[in-house]
Image: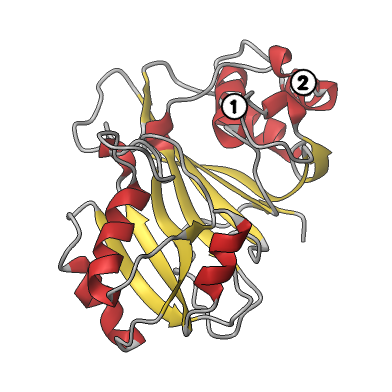
């Protein structure tokens, strides 16, 4: 959004924050696209404009890629619309397709930005192992036929915790920014044939989680040792890391803010390795 347009939007009466969940399978990512390409933002802005009676332009906590899902995406926008905030989810959901849902709505502080005010983000990645795929998980998990060594994966995960330059797991084409991030949580929990990975950090680089997962799978297959995974992280060289994991297994589950009016979704993930 151009600066002058942003200032025009901020002259409106209200700053509304939404907690949004969506199945990203049918969409070309979250960020608005030029029709006929459709992104989650296109659909959500259109429905919000109808409810609030003015043009809506969203800022989002994360620009999820095509095929990536969200259980805890956060957006905000400025509006002169007068609908009470408690009525917003039901009103907007009545206009949205079933694969996009507004879970909660809040009256945000004037200087709040879903993107710039975020303190921590959490992503989950799911892998289904075993010879037989599942028709119920094919849109939400990466199916890998061979077994994976979870003990080796858990050892490798420890090296991610703390502050690091994550250039080895950064894809080309993302926005220019520092590659240094602080990983506060990194875990892998097995439940039957499913592996659930959870990563929480103060920020993530373009394709960072999917590139980490692709390299961890190499550890699980025995192609890499945990010590070699740690060396790849320290090398700051994308060419050393593994392939990018498929988008379908990734979900943005939670975004944290220093705001007493904001209620994040419940942390339904199992507890694991943390820095504190």
Position in image of residue 91 (x %, y %): 21, 75
x 48%, y 79%: residue: 12
Against 154, residue 184 (above or below) is below
Rendered residue at 38%/39% (across/down) = 33
**Disc 1, SS:** helix
Q: CA distance from mark 2 to mark 1?
A: 12 Å
Whether residue 215 sits left or right of residue 177 in the image: it is left
Q: Position of residue 270 (x, y in %)?
A: 51, 56
In the rendered view, tell whether residue 26 sits above or below residue 6. above
Residue at the disc numbered 2? 232
Instruction: Give the residue drawn at x 23%, y 68%.
Output: 50
Q: How many residues crowd mark 1 within 10 Å: few (<14), some (14–19), many (20+)?
A: many
Relative to 11, residue 214 above or below: above
Asked if marks 2 and 1 touch (Cβ < 8 Å), the reply is no
Q: Nearer the viewer, residue 81 or 163?
A: 81
* Spot occupied by residue 7 in the image (x, y as percentages of width and height): 59, 69
Which residue sits at x=37%, y=51%? 41
The tally of labels here is 2
Left or right of 30: which side holds 208?
right
Provide the secondary structure element on which disc 2 rests.
Answer: helix
Quadrant of image for the C terminus: bottom right
Q: Which mark is residue 184?
A: none
User: Local crowd at mark 2 within 10 Å, few (<14), some, or many (≥20)?
Assistant: many
Above or below: residue 158 compared with residue 120:
above
Tell me residue 208's x, y (percent): 62, 34
Residue 195 in view (yes/no): no
Image depth: mark 2 or mark 1 in front: 1
Examine the rendering and report whether any part of residue 131 can be seen: yes
Q: Quadrant of residue 260?
A: bottom right
- Residue at image mark 1: 211
Identify the colour scheme used. Answer: secondary structure
């Amino acid at each position: 959004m151009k600066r002058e347009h942003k200032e025009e939007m901020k002259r409106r009466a209200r700053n509304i924050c939404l907690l949004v969940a969506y199945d990203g399978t049918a969409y070309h990512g979250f960020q608005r696209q030029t029709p006929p390409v459709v992104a989650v933002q296109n659909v959500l802005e259109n429905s919000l404009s109808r409810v609030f009676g003015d043009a809506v332009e969203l800022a989002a906590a994360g620009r999820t890629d095509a095929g990536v899902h969200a259980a805890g995406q956060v957006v905000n926008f400025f509006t002169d619309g007068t609908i009470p905030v408690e009525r917003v989810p039901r009103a907007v959901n009545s206009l949205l397709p079933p694969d996009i849902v507004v879970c909660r709505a809040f009256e945000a502080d004037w200087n709040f930005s879903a993107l710039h005010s975020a303190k921590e983000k959490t992503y989950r990645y799911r892998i289904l192992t075993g010879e037989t795929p599942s028709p119920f998980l094919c849109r939400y998990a990466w199916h890998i036929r061979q077994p994976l060594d979870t003990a080796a994966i858990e050892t490798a995960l420890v090296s991610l915790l703390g502050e690091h330059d994550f250039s080895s797991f950064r894809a080309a084409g993302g926005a220019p920014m520092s590659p240094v991030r602080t990983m506060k949580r990194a875990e892998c929990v097995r439940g039957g044939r499913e592996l659930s990975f959870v990563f929480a950090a103060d920020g993530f680089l373009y394709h960072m989680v999917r590139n980490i997962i692709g390299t961890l799978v190499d550890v699980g297959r025995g192609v890499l040792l945990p010590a070699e995974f740690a060396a790849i992280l320290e090398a700051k060289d994308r060419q050393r890391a593994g392939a990018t994991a498929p988008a379908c297994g990734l979900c943005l589950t939670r975004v944290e803010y220093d705001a007493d009016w904001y209620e994040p979704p419940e942390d339904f993930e199992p507890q694991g390795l943390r820095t504190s």
